[in-house]
Amino acid sequence: MGAQQRKSGARSVLALTAAGGVVAGMLGFAGAGTAQAAPAKLVQQYDCVFPLIGSDPIEATITAEIPTEIEVGTASPAFAVNTATKVSSRAAQGLGLVGGKTLEGKATATVTVYTPDGPLSGIGVENTVEKTNIPSPPADFTVNAKGNAPSLTFNTVGDARIEVNGIGLHDMIVRDANGKPIQLVTGKDTFDAPCTLKSTDKVLASFKIVPKNPTNPTNPTNPTNPTNPTNPTNPTNPTNPTNPTDPTNPTAPSGSTAQQNLSTQVKAAAGTLSMSQPGDSVALSAVNQGLGGVSSGNLQTVTVKDGRNGATGWSLTGKVTDFTGTAGAIGADKLSWKPACTTSPGSKSNCVAGTEGPVGTVGATLAGAPDAAATGGQFTVDSALNLTIPATAAAGDYKAVLTLTLT
């Protein structure tokens, strides 16, 4: 699992304007050392944010073939998981209004495997969303996705289960009748989409981790001495089992051999890198038409928790879309921030605030902690937000999406 590798811990979106979607690819176990596979099925409800129409519900049905048992110490090969996601006619109508004919992209599922050694959390599995026709006239439609599970090895006998915690849609593409991408986010052919899990059921499958088969395939007729099945007590002298050094003297001192099987265990790290925030919207102050000025506010406070107990630091970055509305647009480069970061007592890492300045569509660093001999802890990240509005901006409401990514 690579506890020391830096990996995505979380993604957060403020002031929603994105697109919605698909779940696929959890975890699986099949092949040597496993019991016969059994069908698994999980239906989950999500709210995803589509372009043009905002939040809209989807229903994801996840299916897979997962065994009821797997042996200790046996690596599980990857296998396919399929997900059929029902999208509403309202989403089809919104995408159709901009000339959208097909939808495709990527979906990353976040999974936790609960084992006798503790949870294996923060497992992200990327899946391919198949190109799907957007119905016209608008109607409910189904989007299919496929992914392959990673290989895992378990070290302790007991009960285990697989839970699906959420999804993240990214690199989504809407194409027109000529196959050309439609830019739903200014300057980009693709878009990311936040989805919020509404269902309480997260369990895809339960299974048992069982002891390894104790048989000896090397020598089934003599498991205590695989090198000499005809004489287990004296492999070097089969004619005189009581004296391996002198076959003519049966009264000489006797000898024997014995074997011991050794094993050890390296447990997976239980800690994760994650972040949380109290809300997903920020209302900036109003500015009078014709005068221009600064529309200001404060970022929703972000709490970063690093429980990996390793030597790897973390980075929290952000990027913003253009502010758009019925009256026009204000460029993403007009939004700037002034980051601040506080380290909680007892933390091993030191939190460093990002540089004050514009955020933009390319993005900027909000905060981070460097690699060190020992890292980990809890950190609070805040920032003032200032949007410079030109005097020529028309009266109206403007909205944008600020996406925060923790790695």
Image (tube, grey):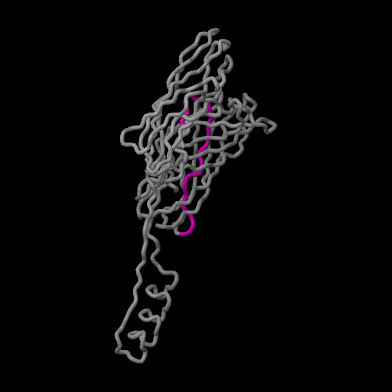
Q: Let me know if residue 24 is in the magenta part.
A: yes
| Residue nearest the viewer, comparing 381 with 32 | 381
Question: In the current view of this chain or complex, which residue is farthest to the right?
Answer: 178
- Observer able to see residue 21: yes
**Residue closest to the eye, 188 or 163:** 188
Percent across and percent down for residue 358 are: 52, 23
**Residue in front for this viewpoint, 15 or 203:** 15
Q: Residue at x 43, y 42 (%)?
A: 312
Q: Position of residue 298 (x, y in %)?
A: 42, 21
**Residue 321 as seen in the image, left or right of residue 369:** right
**Residue sitting at 48 percent across and 12 percent down?**
286
Q: Which residues are magenta?
A: 12-32
Q: Position of residue 83 (x, y in %)?
A: 52, 41
In percent of the image, x 46 and y 35: which residue is there?
315
Q: Residue most toward the bottom?
A: 248
User: Is 281 above or below relative to 261?
Assistant: above
What secondary structure predominates along the stretch shown in magenta?
loop
What residue is rendered at 40% in x and 80% in y?
Answer: 235
Q: Is residue 163 visible?
A: no
Residue 41 within the segment the image draws in magenta: no
In the rendered image, which quarter is residue 264 located in? Answer: bottom left
Exactly how many numbered labels are in the figure? 0
Rendering quarter of residue 202: top left
* Left or right: 334, with 137 as reference point: left
* Residue nearer the viewer, 310 or 43: 310
